[in-house]
Image: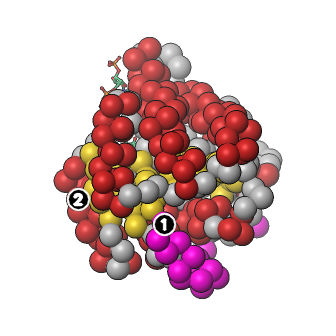
Amino acid sequence: MSSKLVSAPVSRSTDVFRPDIFKGKVLFCTGGGSGICKAMTEAIMHHGASAAIVGRKLDRLTESAKELSQATGQTCLPTQADVRQPQQLKDAVAKTIEKFGRIDFVICGAAGNFLASIDGMSENAFRTVLEIDTMGMFNTVKATLPYIRASQGAYIHVSATLHYKGTPYQVHVSAAKAGVDALSAVLAVEEGPRGVRTNVIAPGPIANTEGMSRLSNQAGSKERPYPLGRMGHLQDVANAAVFLFSDAASYITGQVLPVDGGCEHMRSFQ
Ligand code: HXC
């Protein structure tokens, strides 16, 4: 099998789903100012939704919101909040409600990562990533749940695949993302009776992302074979988000959907 990256074209969700399936809906997305979450936001806006994007850096959010509006013709509100601060999230939710009057979809995507061995990681470093990824998700769910109940809406949480096995230098992210997966499962069974759905997207190796560039710069990392002959594109993850928020996924909740091109099933003989 070739290990070369194949730049195959990737379908956009608008090639598959009607462009108005999210008309009148509102997305609240943490981490939406860049990378995978920005790509998911753009795809959902392409189907008619308005969006609020949340992050720590208002200048970057403002720039991204402009780009997203221009690309989709929909309204995008930049709202500053650190997901570790529950009150800041509540304020961001209040601004979103003031602007749009409702929230239908939430993407919990804010995350932190760096490479460090267990031996080289301080307690504060470990705690910081758990606070951003896992507590940040909890805080976001707490701040948005009344509105998601009211709209009978849905959550998508951005996890990873690296905690399925022991990934060196990723103990903090592995522990944090295992918590994300578990929290979503509990949310599914507690809130399912109220019409709320929740699922996890677990991106594998996705090209042109901060996470991938950090991991692939890891000492000793080497190119690996890809079952589908290429790395993932941002659009692949965005397409999965459109599907999971759509009515086509109305009986899917509490699941983890790896978008990894089959990489987790790949055993390499060395
Ligand atoms: C060891 C480190 C470190 C490193 C930070 N720390 N970087 N330790 N190696 N490379 C330690 C610091 O020394 C400090 O501990 C503690 O972590 C907190 O660091 P701060 O800089 O004070 O925290 P903060 O400013 O809140 O920044 C959070 C962050 C930062 C996670 C450290 O990198 C960040 O904000 N990143 C956001 C963007 C990002 O990482 N995106 C990538 C997401 S990708 P001490 O003990 O000194 O106080 C992703 C996908 C994963 O998550 C899957 C990939 C496939």
- In the rendered image, residue 192, in percent from the top left (x then y), is placed at 71, 45
Q: Secondary structure at mark 2?
A: helix
Quarter of the rendering occupied by the C terminus: top right
Residue 41, image quadrant: bottom left
Question: Gap between marks 1 and 2, in whole Å?
Answer: 21 Å
Residue underneath mark 2: 62
In the image, is 181 to the left or to the right of 97?
A: right
Q: Check disc 1 and report its element: helix, strand or loop.
A: loop
Residue 179, percent across and down?
62, 30
Is residue 42 inside the magenta stretch?
Answer: no
Q: Which quadrant of the figure contains the N terminus?
A: bottom right
| Viewer-nearest residue: 219 or 240 | 240
Upstream in the sequence, badge 1 or badge 2?
1
Whether residue 180 is visible, yes or no, is: yes
Who's the residue at 45% across and 27% down the image?
A: 131
Residue at 36% across, 38% down: 89
Question: Residue 86 location in percent, x, y?
Answer: 38, 30
Q: Which residue is mark 1?
A: 25
Q: Residues within 10 Å of mark 1 (few under 14, many from 20)?
A: many
Q: Position of residue 90 (x, y in %)?
A: 36, 38
The image's mark for residue 218 is: none
* Residue found at x 61% / y 54%: 152
Is 22 magenta? The answer is yes
* Residue interval drawn in magenta: 1-25
**Coloured how?**
secondary structure
Q: Amino acid at mark 1?
A: Lys
Q: Is residue 76 above or below residue 84?
A: below
Q: Residues within 10 Å of mark 2 (few under 14, many from 20)?
A: some
The secondary structure that dominates the magenta segment is loop
Residue flagged by tag 2: what amino acid is it? Thr
